[in-house]
């Protein structure tokens, strides 16, 4: 009798705490927290692995991006009866020729425009600041600012001083970097050289054996896991290839259209601003804002009517890109909500800086594929998301409980 009483009170307590599933979940979270705490205490053991990943991750990422860009070209060459290895060497020869052409003909011009823009941009910015200052002083807003003891001149002077310091720091960055941290400079330079040297070798083997890599990975898994893993790998490959190829093509189209538009309206530094628009368009939503800001400042300083022309060019470019180019090239392959993209960009940028901003969206797309498939397997395994059986089960359980109470 006493044993039944204890069992009754134990059952009531478990129900009061939320049932067995909640207790199991809390215990699982507690064990996971203990495991994380233990691994944090012995994190020094994994330092060599961290160093290895830091060394390898840059060339691997660059090689993977190049692989997804060049894979369609290699497939076309193979369809034309060109041997795969011969097609890879042909791609390498053409790529080296294009890079040499860019370095000898285009790069010096872009470098000159960029250096001139860096030197003159502070003056452009300060002219805009002074124009805003005069506008505010002549308006009724100045009386409101004075009522709240807001000194506009001191704020603008602080902005001017900080901007001048930033320019001085940027101009002397190489010298101060060498003087203050030779070790950091050498390690960074070594990492860049290693990446440049190793990327062609990694890319060669990816182009040669990349199609067979999933099969090698599947052979390492138990037979019952191969079908689901193959599905996940196929979806992840589709997501990454669609995003990389689509973003690069869209960025090139935007850069060409912006450069042509700026040249037509006569905006200074049109080519370098077009290149900036091409580079920043890789980042969704935030990229166009970054690209249009310096162009708008330069346009305002040159002539107020130039800002109107800039707005017309930018509107046409965005309409053409949004209505024709992106739907045709990228479609809706990622199926990611715009708010989710903004949150991912902000989070990945805060965690990993510029690489996080560039790689955050494709990384999220791959993670989404993996989590979605794991959730699908969970539903298939436990069958807890089939509404009708679950409803019948709950109704039967409720009726049985009422009969027990009677």
Image (tube, helix red, strand yellow):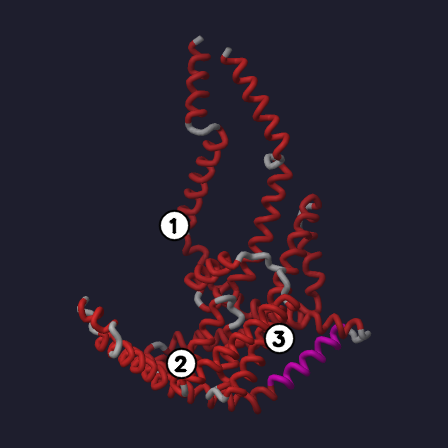
Q: CA distance from mark 3 to mark 2?
A: 40 Å
Q: Secondary structure at mark 1?
A: helix
In this orientation, which residue lies closer to the viewer: 320 or 60? 320
Q: CA distance from mark 3 to mark 1?
A: 39 Å
> In the image, is residue 396 above or below residue 116?
above
**Who comes first in sequence, dot 3 or dot 1?**
1
**Who comes first in sequence, dot 3 or dot 2?**
3
Q: Are marks 1 and 2 in contact (CB under 8 Å)?
A: no
Q: Is residue 264 visible?
A: yes
- The location of residue 148, given as percent across then percent down, is 19, 66
Classify residue 170 as left or right of residue 137: right
> In the image, is residue 1 above or below residue 166?
above
User: What residue would you read off at disc 2?
Assistant: 297
In this orientation, which residue lies closer to the viewer: 396 or 32? 396
Q: CA distance from mark 1 to mark 2?
A: 51 Å
**Who comes first in sequence, dot 1 or dot 2?**
1
Which image quarter holds the N terminus?
top left
In this orientation, which residue lies closer to the viewer: 47 or 326? 326
Q: Secondary structure at mark 3?
A: helix
Label 2 crowd bin: few (<14), some (14–19), many (20+), radius 10 Å: some
User: What residue would you read off at disc 3?
Assistant: 200
Identify the mark at residue 359; answer none if there is no mark: none
- The location of residue 211, given as percent across then percent down, is 71, 63
At 33% across and 84% down in the image, what residue appears?
127
Identify the mark at residue 41; answer none if there is no mark: 1
Quadrant position of residue 337: bottom right
Image depth: mark 3 or mark 1 in front: 3
Q: Secondary structure at mark 2?
A: helix
> Residue most toward the top?
1
**Magenta highlight range:** 84-99
Q: Is residue 179 visible?
A: no
- Residue 363 falls inside the magenta stretch: no
């Amino acid at each position: 009798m006493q044993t039944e009483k204890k069992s009754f009170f134990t059952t009531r307590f478990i129900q009061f705490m939320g049932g067995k599933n909640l207790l199991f979940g809390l215990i699982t979270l507690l064990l996971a927290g203990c495991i994380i705490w233990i691994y944090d205490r012995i994190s020094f053991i994994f330092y060599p692995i961290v160093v290895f990943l830091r060394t390898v991750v840059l060339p691997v990422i660059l090689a993977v991006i190049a692989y997804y860009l060049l894979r369609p070209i290699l497939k076309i060459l193979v369809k034309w009866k060109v041997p795969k290895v011969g097609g890879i060497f042909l791609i390498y020869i053409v790529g080296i020729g294009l890079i040499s052409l860019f370095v000898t003909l285009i790069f010096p011009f872009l470098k000159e425009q960029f250096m001139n823009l860096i030197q003159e941009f502070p003056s452009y910015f300060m002219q805009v600041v002074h124009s805003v200052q005069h506008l505010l002083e002549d308006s009724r807003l100045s009386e409101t600012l004075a009522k709240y003891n807001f000194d506009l001149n001191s704020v603008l002077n602080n902005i001017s001083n900080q901007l001048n310091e930033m320019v001085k720091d940027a101009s002397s960055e190489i010298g101060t970097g060498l003087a203050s941290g030779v070790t950091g400079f050498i390690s960074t330079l070594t990492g860049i050289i290693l990446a440049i040297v190793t990327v062609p070798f990694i890319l060669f083997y990816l182009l040669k054996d990349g199609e067979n890599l999933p099969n090698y990975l599947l052979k390492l898994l138990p037979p019952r896991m191969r079908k689901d893993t193959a599905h996940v790998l196929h979806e992840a490959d589709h997501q990454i290839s669609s995003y990389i190829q689509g973003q690069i093509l869209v960025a090139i189209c935007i850069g060409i259209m912006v450069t042509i538009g700026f040249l037509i309206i006569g905006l200074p530094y049109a080519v370098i601003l077009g290149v900036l628009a091409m580079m920043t368009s890789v980042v969704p939503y935030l990229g166009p804002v970054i690209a249009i800001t310096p162009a708008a400042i330069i346009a305002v300083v040159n002539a107020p009517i130039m800002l109107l022309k800039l707005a017309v060019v930018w509107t046409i470019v965005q309409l053409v890109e949004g209505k024709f180019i992106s739907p045709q090239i990228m479609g809706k392959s990622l199926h990611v909500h715009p708010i989710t993209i903004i949150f991912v960009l902000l989070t990945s940028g805060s965690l990993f800086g510029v690489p996080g901003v560039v790689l955050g969206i494709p990384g999220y797309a791959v993670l989404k594929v993996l989590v979605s498939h794991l959730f699908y397997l969970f539903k298939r395994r436990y069958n807890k998301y089939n509404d009708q059986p679950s409803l019948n089960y709950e109704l039967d359980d409720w009726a049985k409980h009422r009969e027990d109470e009677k």
